[in-house]
Image (cartoon, rainbow, N blue to C red):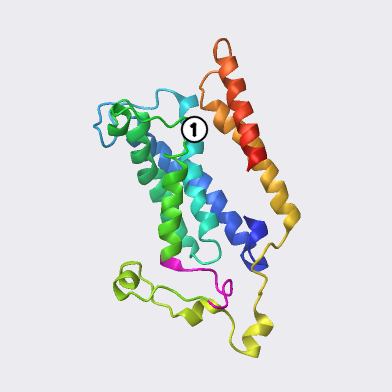
Amino acid sequence: ESSMVRGGNVVNIMMKNMLDLLLGGIFYFFIGYQLAFGNDGSWFAGGFSHGLADPIFFVFQWSFAATASTIDSGACAERVDLYAYVLLSAVTTGVIYPIVCHWGWHPDGWLYEMGFVDFAGSSLVHSVGGVSALVCVVMVGPRIGRFPEYTGVKNKWFRFFFRQKYSDNYFRGVFTETEESIADTNVGSRDPSQALFGTFLLWVAWYSFNCGSTVQISGAGADLVGNVAITTTLSSCFA
């Protein structure tokens, strides 16, 4: 993500990704994990009657929660205040994602009881993060200068609901010679090599993400892990 933003926003986007992990660990430990997998809950959310029964499972699920949250950082890069993003990250990892996770991955969840299957979070993790990111970008609009001919939605009720208070000219970019002299107009890839390196890191990480979802890697589970690894490899190649 830091390779796809302007130079003045590199530290900001790196800090947001770090906060996803830090805040995600805190809020998911104290609130989110219990909402997702706590016993004595309901069809909607888990209860708080029991502590952390499986530390290894918690660490693995924390990575899912942080992933759901970090999708927002890339979607709304360069146009969300750091403090607002901290609040969004905390709510996502501590409340929104855990509740949806409970629906599909806990035996008491209403989706689970209907026979819903999500092997490695394509719906419960990435759809939740994607919908959250979509709502976020609709509210904040595009990056300034990204679309010189930008024309936003004119419906007054839509603009009121999503708190869109800026005009189209605001998002189109610089207007005067003075602004142009100090503005960083490079809204494309700032460092392609860094973007490529990040792609390789993601590819390798997907093996632990997907293969780890089998929750078994020895004995009878070895063949399943191999099949998941092959599927992950081919998916990456075709993508």
Q: Where is residue 45 in the image (x, y as percent from the top left)?
A: 28, 36
Q: Is residue 124 left or right of residue 110?
A: right
Position of residue 98 relative to residue 160, above or below, is: above
Q: Which residue is drawn at 25% across and 27% down?
A: 40
> Residue lying farthest bottom?
177
Q: How many marks?
A: 1
Query: Residue at the right extreme?
Result: 193
Residues 6 and 111: in front is: 111
User: Residue drawn at (42%, 53%), measured in percent from left and top?
Assistant: 132
What type of secondary structure mainly makes up the magenta span?
A: loop
Quadrant placement of the N terminus:
bottom right
Helix or strand or loop: what does disc 1 sit on?
A: loop
Residue 110, quarter of the rendered image:
top left
Residue 146 magenta: yes
228 drawn magenta:
no
**Residue 172, position as x, y percentages in the image:** 54, 78
Image position, residue 67 (x, y; %) = 51, 43
Instruction: Look at the image and give the residue range highlighted in magenta.
Output: 139-149
Residue appearing at x 69%, y 53% in the figure:
195
Figure check: 177 above or below 73: below
Q: Quadrant of residue 161?
A: bottom left
Amino acid at the residue labelled 1: Ala
Label 1 CA crowd tier, 10 Å (few <14, some 14–19, many 20+): some
Q: Where is residue 152 drawn, in percent x and y? A: 44, 74
User: Can residue 47 be seen in this snapshot?
Assistant: no
| One can see residue 49 in this view | yes
The C terminus appears in which quarter of the rendering? top right
Q: Residue furthest top?
A: 219
Is 106 positioned to the left or the right of 184 in the image? left
Q: Name the residue under label 1.
A: 120
